[in-house]
Amino acid sequence: MGAGKSTVGALLASAFGVTGRDTDTDVETSAGRSVADIFVSDGEERFRELERAAVATALADHDGVLSLGGGAVLDPGTRALLADYRAAGGAVVFLRVGLADAVKRVGLGTSRPLLLGNVRGRIKALLEERTPVYDSVASHTVDTDGRDPQDVAREIQELIAR
C-alpha cells in the first residue's frame, strides 16, 4: 500500500517492451464495479476470491509485468499461485515501503476501503501484518523509501537480468 506497485509495474513493462497488467483493474473489469464498492458491498473475503481468480488467470495467460494489490498475498490460494510461479523461475518482487513514505504516498484523506478511520494507524497495522508474508513469497525485495519510481524500476531490471 503506497509502495508504487502500479507505477513501477507500468515503467517495467515499458522498459521490457511488454504489456503491464494490474489485478485490481482485472477485478474491476470482471465485476463491473470498483474495488472500493466490492469491499463495501461484498466484503474483503469476496474481494480476495475475485482477486485470487484474477491472479490465476493473469499468471496463466499473461507474459508481461503483473502488479498485484497490496493485500493479495494474504490469501493462501494467491500465495500458493505465486510460490508456484516463483518455483517455475518467475520473479516475484516485493516493493518494501516504510510507514512514513506509505502515509505520504497514500495520503491521510484516502478513500481506500481498508484505511477508513485512523489512516496512519491502519497503514502501520497493515505493514506489520503483510511484510512477513511478502518476505516469504518474494524472490527479490526492493526498498522504495525516498526513491522515485524510475530508480526503483531500474533496480528491478538489474535484479531480474542477473
Image (tube, rainbow, N blue to C red):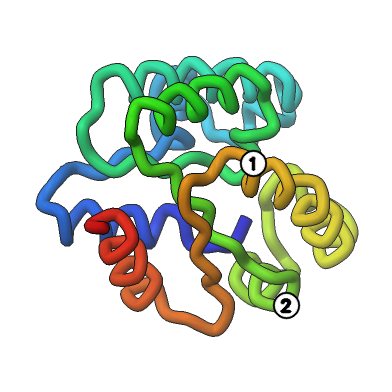
- In the shown orientation, is residue 28 left or right of residue 162? right
* Residue type pointed to by label 2: Ala
Is 34 in front, or is 92? 92
User: For numbered disc 2, what is the local secondary structure?
Assistant: helix
The image's mark for residue 103 is none
Residue 136 seen in the figure:
yes
Check the image and name the residue furthest to the bottom: 146
Measured as percent of width and height from the top left, residue 39 is found at 69, 30
Q: Is residue 14 left or right of residue 101?
A: left
Instruction: State the mark number for residue 100.
Output: 2
Compare residues 28 and 89 and report the one nearer the observer.
89
Is residue 32 visible in the rendered image? The answer is no
The outermost residue toward the front is: 162
Locate the C terminus and report the quarter of the image it occupies: bottom left
Q: Amino acid at mark 1?
A: Ser
Spatial separation of the CA atoms under disc 1 and disc 2:
23 Å
Q: Residue at x 54, y 70 (%)?
A: 143
* CB contact under 8 Å: marks 1 and 2: no
Numbered tag placed on residue 136 in the rendering: 1
Rendered image quadrant of residue 12: bottom left
Residue 45 falls in which quadrant of the image?
top right
